Image (cartoon, grey):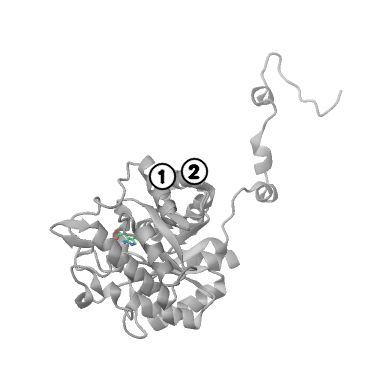
């Protein structure tokens, strides 16, 4: 008798009779076979690093709610841009913490060609031309009330905000920004920005639309980082998408693409993987996620308490974006994960 034929008690049903010999564990049995069938991979090319800029020189401030993230003066941001480029990170996204006395009701300081964000772009582009620069045109770092638009009689006025945002985009492009990423969610902003860029000869400056930005509790630490936390009264529900909605997110993305967006972004990230997948399936355009401050801080905090393995949770969350259909991820983990992927 063949010694490989297992003896089976009479009448017993074998596992293979149940599975029809389809055993998915076969390919999971070893590291080599798991690597062989791995469907998605995270590489340094997937990373966009959001950084916070402040005025002054040789200044670096901690952000208590975001351990490991700093506000940096332009000279230090240039050094970090050099480090990022060496690591192979394709692009940076810059966000300013503007001096309080420069903030006002309409966010007029965004129209100052030499404001902190445009100075940062010029300095980084001069020192590290090979790294991409993505700039936001939302007004929130510049307004005295922390809203993304012009506030009048308790209302964020749409069209006036769009005009200002489009003008700011031209100044950011003139400073050297490669991609304008408007996060304000005003209607019509993508078309207006595209027209303004083209009218001023910036045909090659792209637009990454924060197409589906949800009203979310996960932005808390960011508001500390840029100093809007104490300013903001109420919420942003009259312009960000209700986080209960999915069809509306598709309509937003469709509209932004029709107006000329080159890329779409979903924000926040992990709680919205369903939206990422829907947009990727529907439109097949470059699609990004913003793993926002609250997502970063939750992983850092749980890790600091020894409740989860922070590095593994970081990698798992980032790979989840790739699996959901993302072409890239804005993440505060960018330099940390780039170092890890190198090693
Ligand atoms: C506002 C803006 C937000 C973020 C970036 N730009 C949200 C907000 O403050 O309402 C959030 C980024 C993050 O949480 O990491 N235009």
Q: Residue at x 56, y 70 (%)?
A: 88
Residue that carries the numbered disc 1 in the rendered image? 250
Q: Is residue 311 above or below residue 246?
A: below
Q: Residue furthest bottom?
A: 57
Left or right, 312 with respect to 8, comes to left
Q: Is residue 271 above or below residue 80?
A: above
Q: Which residue is mark 2?
A: 282
Report the residue at 45% width, 72% height from top. Answer: 201
The answer to whether residue 300 of the structure is visible from this angle is: yes
Q: Which residue does the image show at 24% across and 69% down from the upper left?
A: 107
Q: Quadrant of residue 94?
A: bottom left
Decide: marks 1, 2 in contact (CB < 8 A)? yes
Quadrant of res 155: bottom left
Quarter of the image for the C terminus: give it.
bottom right
For numbered disc 1, what is the local secondary structure? helix
Of callouts 1 and 2, which one flags the residue occurring earlier in the amino acid sequence?
A: 1
């Amino acid at each position: 008798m063949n010694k490989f034929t297992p003896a089976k008690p009479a009448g017993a049903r074998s596992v293979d009779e149940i599975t029809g010999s389809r055993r998915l564990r076969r390919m999971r049995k070893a590291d080599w076979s798991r690597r062989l069938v791995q469907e998605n991979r995270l590489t340094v090319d997937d990373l966009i690093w959001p950084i916070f800029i402040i005025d002054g020189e040789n200044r670096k401030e901690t952000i208590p709610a975001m351990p490991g993230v700093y506000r940096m003066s332009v000279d230090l941001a240039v050094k970090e841009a050099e480090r990022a480029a060496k690591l192979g990170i394709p692009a940076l996204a810059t966000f300013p913490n503007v001096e309080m006395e420069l903030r006002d009701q309409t966010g007029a300081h965004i129209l100052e060609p030499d404001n902190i964000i445009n100075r940062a772009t010029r300095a980084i582009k001069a020192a590290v031309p090979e790294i991409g620069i993505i700039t936001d045109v939302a007004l929130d770092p510049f307004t005295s009330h922390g809203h993304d638009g012009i506030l009048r009689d308790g209302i964020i006025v749409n069209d006036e905000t769009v005009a200002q945002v489009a003008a700011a985009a031209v100044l950011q492009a003139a400073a050297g920004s490669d991609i304008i990423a408007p996060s304000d969610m005003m209607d019509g902003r993508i078309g207006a920005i595209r027209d303004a860029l083209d009218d001023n000869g910036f045909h090659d400056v792209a637009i990454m639309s924060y197409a589906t930005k949800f009203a979310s509790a996960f932005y808390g630490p960011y508001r500390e980082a840029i100093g809007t936390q104490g300013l903001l009264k109420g919420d942003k529900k009259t312009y960000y998408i209700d986080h209960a909605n999915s069809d509306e997110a598709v309509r937003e993305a469709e509209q932004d693409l029709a107006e000329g967006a080159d890329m779409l972004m979903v924000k926040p990230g992990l709680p919205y993987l369903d939206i990422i997948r829907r947009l990727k399936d529907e439109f097949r355009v470059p699609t990004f996620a913003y793993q926002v401050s609250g997502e970063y801080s939750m992983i850092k905090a749980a890790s600091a308490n020894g409740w989860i393995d922070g590095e593994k949770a970081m990698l798992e969350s980032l790979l989840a974006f790739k699996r959901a259909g993302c072409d890239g991820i804005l993440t505060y983990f960018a330099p940390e994960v780039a170092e890890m992927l190198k090693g």
